[in-house]
Image (cartoon, helix red, strand yellow):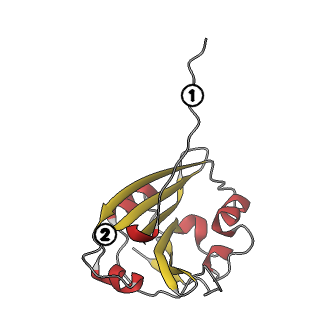
Amino acid sequence: MRLRWRPVDAQEGVGGQESFLLHRVPEEVAQHHALPSGGVLVRARVMRADATVVQVATSYFPGDVAFGTQLEQQDTGDGGSKSRLAELGYQQTSIRESINVRPPSKTEAESLGISADRLVYEITHVGLTESGRAVEVCVHVMPITLWSLSYEWPIDLPSA
């Protein structure tokens, strides 16, 4: 499988930092993408709030969608990857997320500046088009001590 790595520019406040740790695409990511033979574009970044690392995030995009596009650039432009995907005809119309709590890997602990015995949230975010195709999978790894998760959904009421 062919992988292309692209870093995200470091920015003031919350921003990314280059990351070139080469690894295989995780099995759960491969399942979400139904990976094409052309491979996957991988964007890995370390995100900070001031000097504190608050998360590491790795995004995976199908190569047939992302290769040769602005998604390969450090600066994906206004609106980020979701806007670029929409311009390419792959607008995300729904998302699916799963959240797990687990110990960090050694690499994650080092990147986050925490000990390996601390716990992290692993949020796997899948962006889906109207046809149900996954065009982005992003795995966020965040120390649980820095984050509080809160969600809200509308309730589908039964017809009267």
Residue at image location 41% in from the left, 53% down from the top: 98
The quadrant of the picture occupied by the C terminus is top right
What amino acid is at disc 2? Leu
Front residue of 66 and 158: 158
Residue at image location 32% in from the left, 61% down from the top: 101
Q: Quadrant of residue 127?
A: bottom right
Q: Position of residue 94 (x, y in %)?
A: 58, 47
**Can you see residue 80?**
yes
The quadrant of the picture occupied by the N terminus is bottom left
**Can you see residue 69?**
no
Front residue of 136 and 52: 52
What amino acid is at disc 1? Asp
Q: Secondary structure at mark 2?
A: loop
Is 57 placed left or right of 99 in the picture? right
Crowd around label 2: few <14 · some 14–19 · many ≥20 (10 Å):
some
Residue for badge 1: 156
Q: Position of residue 44 (x, y in %)?
A: 49, 78
Distance in Å between CA atoms under marks 2 and 1? 34 Å
Q: Secondary structure at mark 1?
A: loop
Indicate which label's residue lies in the foreground, 2 or 1.
2
Front residue of 81 and 69: 81
Residue at image location 73% in from the left, 61% down from the top: 87
Position of 64 relative to 31 (above/below) = below
Residue for badge 2: 119
